[in-house]
């Protein structure tokens, strides 16, 4: 199942000019025995995507790849003394970095899905979520 999911994600990424470098799947069994995905998949939080254009040239020259993932956030945190260890305090991200994170996630969403993100303008987002979930 994981290999089929990965292949489908990699094919979609390739159609959109991306390379799906790696990803994480969390799969469990429902009480009736069915396999179910139990966490996000193929998102920038669980995957690394590189731009396909220029990949080989960057690889050969030793340059970093153009990636659309959260890896740059992890790198920033490490560079600022945070690795998630007990007792460490996460540093505040400066507003320009927060803006860059949002822009990269938006770019990845729109690239992978092939459509523009339409923000939810619901006056009551909790009620909308409850409705979608049938609660």
Image (tube, rainbow, N blue to C red):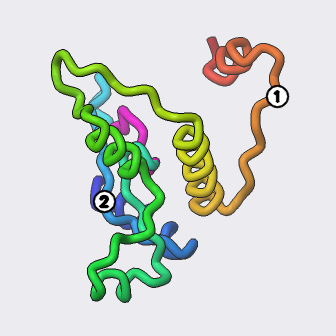
> Which residue bears the numbered disc 2?
22
Residue at screen point 31% across, 27% down:
30
Q: Give neighbour class at mark 2: few <14, some 14-19, many 20+ (Cα, 10 Å).
A: few
Which numbered disc, 2 or 1, marks the residue that appears first in the sequence? Answer: 2
> Which residue bears the numbered disc 1?
121
Relative to 73, residue 95 above or below: above
Mark 1: which secondary structure?
loop
Relative to 24, residue 80 above or below: above
48 part of magenta stretch: no
41 part of magenta stretch: yes
The magenta segment is 36-43
Q: Give neighbour class at mark 1: few <14, some 14-19, many 20+ (Cα, 10 Å).
A: few
Residue 24 lies left or right of residue 125; in this view the side is: left
Q: Residue furthest left?
A: 86
x, y (%) of residue 108? Answer: 56, 56
Occupied quadrant, residue 28: top left
Residue 102 lies left or right of residue 84; in this view the side is: right
x, y (%) of residue 101? Answer: 53, 45
Mark 2: which secondary structure?
strand
Relative to 48, residue 89 above or below: above
Residue at screen point 76% across, 31% down:
120
Give the distance between the C-alpha atoms of the residues marked 2 and 1, in whole angstroms. Answer: 33 Å
Q: Main secondary structure of the magenta part?
A: loop
**Nearer to me, 11 or 16:** 16
Residue at screen point 44% across, 26% down:
92
x, y (%) of residue 99? Answer: 61, 42
Residue 121 lies left or right of residue 109; in this view the side is: right
Relative to 30, residue 125 above or below: above
């Amino acid at each position: 199942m994981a290999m089929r999911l990965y292949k489908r994600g990699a094919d979609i990424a390739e159609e959109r000019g991306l390379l799906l470098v790696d990803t994480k799947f969390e799969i469990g069994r429902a009480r009736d025995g069915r396999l179910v995905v139990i966490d996000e998949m193929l998102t920038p939080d669980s995957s690394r995507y590189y731009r396909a254009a220029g990949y080989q040239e960057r690889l050969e020259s030793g340059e970093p790849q153009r990636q659309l993932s959260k890896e740059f956030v992890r790198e920033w945190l490490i560079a600022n003394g945070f690795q998630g260890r007990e007792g460490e305090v996460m540093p505040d991200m400066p507003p320009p970095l927060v803006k860059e994170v949002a822009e990269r996630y938006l770019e990845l969403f729109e690239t992978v899905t092939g459509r523009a993100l339409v923000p939810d303008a619901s006056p009551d987002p909790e009620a909308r979520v409850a409705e979608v979930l049938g609660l």
